[in-house]
Image: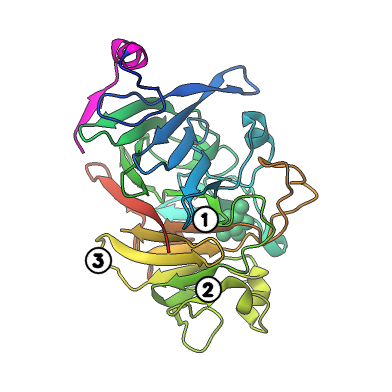
Amino acid sequence: MKTKKILPFMILASLLGSGVNAGDCCDGCSVPSRSFGELADGRTAMIYTLTNKSGMKAEITNYGGVVVNLMVPDRDGKLADVALGFDKVSDYEKKVYYFGSLIGRYGNRIANGTFELDGVTYKLPLNNEPGGIPCSLHGGFKGFHTVLWDAEPLVAEDGTQGLKLSYVSKDGEEGYPGNLTVTVHYWLDAANALRISYEASTDKATPVNLTNHSYFNLAGEGSPTINDHELMLKASAFTPVNAGLIPTGEIAPVEGTPFDFRTPHPIGERVDADHPQIALGGGYDHNWVLDNQDGSMALAARVKHAATGRVMEVWTMEPGIQFYGGNFLDASDLSSAKSGKPYPKRSGFCLETQHYPDSPNQPAFPSTILRPGEAYKTTTEYRFSAE
Ligand code: BGC
């Protein structure tokens, strides 16, 4: 996408200009930003407000690249914030649910926090232990969700507003090899799509699996359940897990199981079904093997909330998607989030586009290894509409 740099005089011009507010979206307008508060180490996190011509709004902070607020119209044009999260950056530092965060260097779990690459064994921090079995989750304690990214607001020639986030993850950071240079672009287009494009390059072979960990509730965050949302997943298979939520290596057909979302089903319909994989996941917390495996942009998921008419489609180039039904959300710890309402278990869902969990230890899975000279490039879009 062609972009213009926003220079201070443009911001001033847009503010002084003919009745244009900083929040309005038109060619030449700026992306407003404000402080999102101080981090524990004294640095200031910023928050950037992307708007489009249809009235949708995405507020993104450079702390963890978190999508903090996502205002989406219902069938009557009424906006609601469909993204779970906090209104203080300090809460994001203290409470690690990965609300809205960018995830890296490796999304989801790596068994025992260990992998071997080109004859070298690497050890990662063990920051998670489902079923008492330790693993490394979402890039470790200081994964990309904890990074204060360099941020550059952007406006495309057609007025589309975006945010470029950059970070260099040093060789050895959280145990991973190679200096990894990462760029993420968020764009909010006129058709109500939030596009996330990820790029990375390295100077040593390393696993890379980047995603975004937004939790959605299409009735509005703070609504008590997602069980009434209808979900479709374009996936004929999934990767069953063991007690540590690590894939067993099997690619299992969804046919005849509660994991078959090839036609839409309410999330709550089978979430407590008597199925060993549901028991292990405490509900849905699995990687689906998307039907599209050729790296092109394709529809992966569609979620509909009938009462408001809000629809969210997920389009991606990735081969997998983690449908996580918010089983670990805990109202006692999340008694007062953004809206002042608690976030109980299963009040938000994630659809994390990704390569499969534990791929560095699973040679039969599509490779996640990036080598020097190669370009990691992948795009996911969350497309909103109402019917
Ligand atoms: C994982 C869950 C985990 C959650 C963390 C998801 O991607 O699949 O098992 O609890 O992230 O909030």
Q: Give the left or right position of residue 27, taking residue 112 as reference.
A: left
Say whether mark 3 is within 8 Å of ligand 1. no
In the image, residue 241 lies at what x, y percent?
57, 71
Name the residue rendered at 23%, 46% in the picture: 374
Q: Label 2 neighbourhood size at 10 Å, few (<14), some (14-19), many (20+)?
A: some
CB within 8 Å, label 2 to label 1:
no
Q: Give the amino acid at mark 1.
A: Asn
Q: CA distance from mark 2 to mark 1?
A: 14 Å
Percent of width and height locating residue 193: 36, 49
Examine the image and state in which quarter residue 326 appears: bottom right
Residue 226 among those drawn in magenta: no
Asked if 51 appears above or below 138 in the picture, the reply is: above
Q: Which residues are magenta?
A: 1-16
- Figure quadrant, ligand 1: bottom right
Residue 108: mark:
1
Distance from Cα at disc 3 to Cα at disc 2: 23 Å
Is residue 53 visible in this depiction of the protein? yes
Image: 234 above or below 342? below
Element type at mark 1:
loop
Residue at x 65%, y 56% (from the top left corner): 134
Q: Is residue 12 magenta?
A: yes
Camera-near label (3 vs 1) is 3
Q: Residue at x 46, y 58 (%)?
A: 75
Secondary element type, mark 3: loop
Task: Look at mark 2 in the image and give the residue it sits on.
Answer: 248
Does mark 1's beta carbon lie closer than 8 Å to ligand 1?
yes
Badge 3 density bin: few <14, some 14–19, many ≥20, Cα 10 Å = few
Q: Amino acid at mark 3?
A: Asp
Mark 1, other Cα within 10 Å: few <14 / some 14–19 / many ≥20: many
Give the position of the N terminus as an image quadrant.
top left
Q: Please tell me which of labels 2 and 1 falls first in the chain.
A: 1
